[in-house]
Amino acid sequence: MLVISYTSRDNDIRIINARKATKKAVLSNSDEITSWLSEMVNRADFSFRVNGKYPCNINQYSDLLDHPKREGTYLKDNTAGSILYPVIALWACLLDDEALYKKVQSIKEQHLQHCNFQYWYPDETSEAHFYRNDDFHGAALSPLSIEDPPEKFLEQLFEECGKTQAFHELSAMKAGIWPLVLVACRHYRLPVPLHLLQGFAKTESSRR
């Protein structure tokens, strides 16, 4: 069996390269990304206004067939928490699309004041379950304040990276095969760990 050993410095270099590669790929398609996200937000807003098929927390197909219902607490019960809108707001900030960020703020204010906006981070249990998704893992930062300006919103998100070092202990990161993390996120519908996106961050501290 071939065993490859990496030093801490090797791993740091690989993470930096991962951030650079991710940033390059995103920036080369920034217009398409913001256009797609903007249309997604527009459709969600319209669905809320007409009680259409707005995004919800339902995970059973049989229940989705009857979505939405015109019952008293139905909307609140099925939109109690969201990672979707914080992710859209995140990319709006990273790609400097203030109009898109304001659209997310508007949805929160007009339709989802009850909703707990949050973001997901790997934790100490993630290594055992990240690649197979055979159990719950990770931790959530909540509630996120979307009322803040973009710089403060990013600061909330990226400051947590320093408190969640389990990401650096993932075997894929230690082995330098960081794309495997992105593949797992895509396959199991997990948010991309923000540690890979720190190259985009424009917080108040980084500007000073």
Image: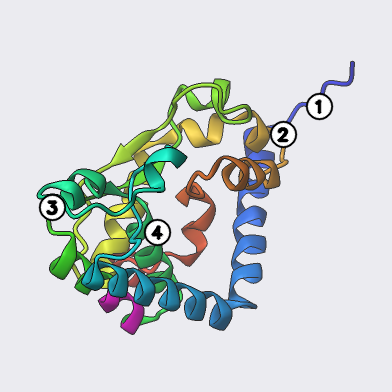
21 part of magenta stretch: no
Q: Position of residue 43 (x, y in %)?
A: 38, 73
Residue linked to disc 1: 4
Distance, label 1 to label 2, CA atoms, is: 8 Å
Distance, label 4 to label 2, CA atoms, is: 27 Å
Asked whether the beta carbons under mark 3 and mark 2 sit within 8 Å of each other, the answer is no
Amino acid bearing label 2: Ala
Residue 114: image tag:
3
Distance, label 3 to label 2, CA atoms, is: 42 Å
Helix, strand, or loop for circle 3? loop
Residue linked to disc 4: 87
Sequence-first tag of 4 and 2 = 4
Give the quarter of the image for residue 62: top left
Helix, strand, or loop for circle 1? loop
User: Counting other residues with Cα less than 10 Å from the Cα at mark 1, is it few (<14), some (14-19), or many (20 or more)?
Assistant: few
Specify start and end residues of the magenta stretch as a single range. Answer: 99-103
Distance, label 4 to label 3, CA atoms, is: 18 Å
Amino acid bearing label 3: His
User: Which residue ends up furthest to the right in the rendered image?
Assistant: 1
Helix, strand, or loop for circle 2? loop
Residue nearest the viewer, comparing 31 with 71 = 71
User: Counting other residues with Cα less than 10 Å from the Cα at mark 2, is it few (<14), some (14-19), or many (20 or more)?
Assistant: some
Residue at (59, 66) in percent of width and height: 23
User: Counting other residues with Cα less than 10 Å from the Cα at mark 3, is it few (<14), some (14-19), or many (20 or more)?
Assistant: some
Sequence-first tag of 4 and 3 = 4
The quarter of the rendered structure image containing the C terminus is: bottom left
Residue linked to disc 2: 175
Q: Position of residue 48 (x, y in %)?
A: 25, 67
Residue at (57, 30) in percent of width and height: 130
